[in-house]
């Protein structure tokens, strides 16, 4: 069983086990329903676009995957979570739509009615999300406020600001040029392409710079990192800004998907998905070492869990309850008390074997 112990210590063991469990549940469900047992993995080309349950998961899970990138860095560097990402998504989408339509205007149906080019509105939405991240990072890194308390400000105020920007109304952008961000690009879902681009960019940055090492160093011991010459304040601040920017990207995707600024519902409960993705990815919520690939797998695993729950007949309103239970279980398993308990049990067992060997 030594091979099992070695495999279980790999960083991607927990997320891959989660994916495997979801697959098993779907195989059993399809078998009970009399479907092809690997129906879950089937996809086909329909009406010029890829279609299938696995494609739907990759498409619908894109926002959570984008958020998980920034959340991973935030958790690793500050040993805390950014609970404002969902609200910041909403704020970014609201600002984008308001700039495109104009304040007080609720519908745009012609390209000539736009108040500015679409790319300007998109960049402005992402930029304001980055500013939200900068504010959160300042409170955490410079003012030493607990991450959850610091990000609680935009968690509660982000959607309200979005409603103020849209004059408390839904703003619709009925333009194909805007819908493309949440629609399709050739035969692929555009959100999946955008998520892949974000993952590739962040991976290249982490591979070609020392940012990843600095983030982990600050997360493990900020005082020692500072003594070693690493500016821990700047590193934490940068991680929150990156998290904000990715929240803005996810907000634009979510807004384009429904081609409207729906401040009350865009990004709702997605902060929980982002945190759960980091935890499912085998990352410690206590900061330090991180595994970006694990977080991405975790994000899509959550969407697979959601899709599976809907297939099993769980109501949409009840789904967060089951996600919360999964979060609690993962956090408890990773808690120092549980780790200390198993370490103590292992020490007792090894001690007993040593005594038996001497006797």
Image (cartoon, rainbow, N blue to C red):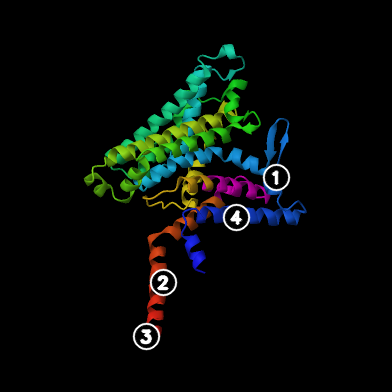
Mark 2 or 3: the one toward you = 3
Magenta stretch: dominant secondary structure: helix
The residue located at (41%, 40%) in the rendering is 207
Q: Nearer the viewer, residue 170 or 77?
A: 77
Residue interval drawn in magenta: 298-321
Counting residues from the start of the chain, the first of labels 2 and 3 encountered is 2
Q: Is residue 185 visible?
A: yes
* Extreme residue toward the top, this view: 112
* Callout 1: SS: loop
* Extreme residue toward the left, this view: 227
Q: Specify the label residue 358 is tagged with.
A: 3
Mark 3 or 1: the one toward you = 3
Q: Going by the image, does 77 lie left or right of 3?
A: left
Residues at marks 2 and 4 touching, judged by CB atoms closer than 8 Å = no
Q: Position of residue 131 (x, y in %)?
A: 38, 29
**Category of crowding for the residue at label 1, using alpha-carbon neighbours closer than 10 angstroms: few (below 14), some (14–19), many (at least 20):** few
Q: Specify the label residue 346 is tagged with.
A: 2
Q: Going by the image, does 54 lie left or right of 12?
A: right
**Category of crowding for the residue at label 4, using alpha-carbon neighbours closer than 10 angstroms: few (below 14), some (14–19), many (at least 20):** few
Label 1: which residue?
Answer: 42
The residue located at (37%, 83%) in the rendering is 355
Q: Specify the label residue 20 is tagged with.
A: 4
Mark pair 2, 1: CA separation: 44 Å
Dividing the picture into quadrants, the one containing residue 108 is top right
Q: Nearer the viewer, residue 152 or 132?
A: 132
Mark pair 1, 4: CA separation: 16 Å
Residues at marks 2 and 3 touching, judged by CB atoms closer than 8 Å = no
**Category of crowding for the residue at label 2, using alpha-carbon neighbours closer than 10 angstroms: few (below 14), some (14–19), many (at least 20):** few
Image: 279 above or below 186: below
Q: Quadrant of the C terminus?
A: bottom left
Counting residues from the start of the chain, the first of labels 3 and 4 encountered is 4
Residues at marks 3 and 4 touching, judged by CB atoms closer than 8 Å = no
């Amino acid at each position: 069983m030594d091979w099992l112990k070695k495999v279980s210590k790999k960083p991607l063991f927990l997320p891959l086990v989660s994916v495997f469990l979801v697959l098993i549940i779907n195989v059993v469900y399809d078998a009970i329903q009399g479907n092809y047992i690997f129906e879950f993995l089937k996809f086909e080309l329909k009406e010029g676009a890829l279609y299938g349950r696995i494609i739907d998961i990759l498409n619908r899970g894109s926002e959570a995957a984008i958020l998980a990138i920034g959340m991973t860095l935030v958790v690793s560097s500050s040993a805390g979570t950014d609970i404002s990402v969902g609200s910041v998504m909403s704020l970014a989408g609201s600002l984008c739509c308001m700039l495109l339509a104009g304040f007080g205007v609720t519908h745009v149906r012609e390209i000539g009615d736009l108040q500015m080019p679409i790319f300007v509105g998109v960049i402005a939405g992402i930029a304001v999300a980055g500013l939200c991240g900068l504010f959160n990072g300042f409170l955490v890194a410079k003012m030493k406020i607990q991450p959850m308390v610091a990000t609680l400000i935009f968690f509660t105020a982000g959607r309200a600001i979005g409603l103020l920007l849209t004059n408390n109304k839904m703003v619709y952008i009925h333009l194909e040029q805007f819908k493309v961000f949440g629609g399709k690009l050739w035969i692929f879902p555009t959100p999946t392409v955008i998520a892949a681009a974000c993952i590739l960019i962040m991976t290249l940055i982490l591979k070609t710079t020392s940012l990843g090492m600095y983030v982990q160093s600050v997360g493990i011991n900020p005082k020692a990192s500072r003594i070693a010459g690493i500016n821990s304040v700047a590193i934490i601040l940068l991680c929150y800004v990156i998290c904000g920017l990715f929240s803005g990207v996810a907000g634009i995707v979510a807004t384009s998907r429904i081609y409207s600024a729906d401040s009350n519902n865009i990004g709702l409960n997605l902060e929980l998905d982002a945190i759960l993705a980091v935890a499912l990815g085998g990352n410690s919520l206590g900061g330090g070492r991180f595994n970006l690939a694990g977080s991405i797998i975790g994000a899509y695993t959550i969407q697979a869990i959601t899709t599976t729950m809907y297939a099993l007949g769980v109501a949409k309103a009840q789904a967060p309850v089951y996600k919360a239970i999964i979060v609690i279980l993962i956090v408890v398993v990773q808690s120092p008390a549980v780790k200390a308990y198993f370490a103590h049990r292992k020490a007792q067992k090894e001690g007993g074997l040593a005594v038996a060997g001497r006797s």
